[in-house]
């Protein structure tokens, strides 16, 4: 199946992300969650710079995922490994685009 290009918005900036059609709803939900996390972190005023805000949000979300699994030091199961790789790739792409925006 061919990926769709989905427009997401994080911190009032739009990004185009390739996504399989059956994962589009989850991507949009993840983007809204990430946006909310980043806004909350930025609102504290303790973290300066969009990249640092993004890293803190990623760490918070990763921590939540580990807690939901019930094993803080658990290694990814084979069932979740593909999903984690996909999300990591999307986070890397978003960070790259944020860095490009800060440069220009």
Image (cartoon, rainbow, N blue to C red):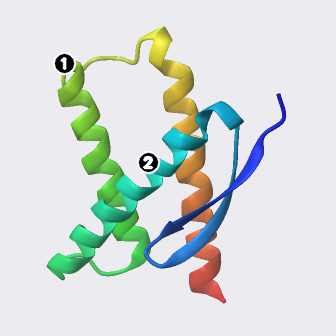
On-image quarter of the N terminus = top right
Where 80 sits versus 33, above or below? above
Residue 27 percent across, percent down from the top left: 53, 45
**Farthest residue, direction top:** 78
Mark closest to the chain's N terminus, 2 or 1: 2
Q: Is residue 11 left or right of residue 9?
A: left
Secondary structure state at the residue bearing disc 1: loop
Secondary structure state at the residue bearing disc 2: helix
Residue 6 percent across, percent down from the top left: 67, 55
Residue 28 percent across, percent down from the top left: 51, 50
Which of 30 and 90 lies nearest the eye of the viewer?
30
Residue 56 percent across, percent down from the top left: 29, 59
- Tally the marks: 2
Which of 103 and 40 lies nearest the eye of the viewer?
40
Q: Is residue 12 left or right of residue 39?
A: right
Label 2 environment density (alpha carbons within 10 Å; few <14, some 14–19, many ≥20): few
**Residue picked out by circle 2:** 29
Q: Which of the 4 quarters of the picture holds residue 99?
A: bottom right
Residue drawn at x 44%, y 48% as measured from the top left = 29
Residue drawn at x 44%, y 47% as measured from the top left = 30
**Residue picked out by circle 1:** 71
Where 31 sits versus 2, above or below? below
Residue drawn at x 23%, y 69% as measured from the top left = 41
């Amino acid at each position: 199946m061919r990926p769709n290009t989905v427009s997401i918005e994080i911190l009032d900036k739009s990004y185009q992300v390739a996504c399989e059609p059956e994962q589009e709803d989850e991507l949009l939900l993840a983007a809204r969650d990430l946006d909310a996390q980043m806004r909350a972190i930025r609102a504290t005023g303790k973290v300066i710079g969009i990249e640092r805000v993004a890293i803190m949000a990623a760490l918070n979300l990763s921590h939540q995922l580990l807690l939901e699994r019930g094993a803080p030091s658990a290694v990814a199961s084979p069932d979740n490994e593909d999903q984690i790789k996909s999300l990591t790739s999307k986070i890397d792409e978003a960070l790259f685009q944020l860095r490009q925006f800060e440069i220009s």
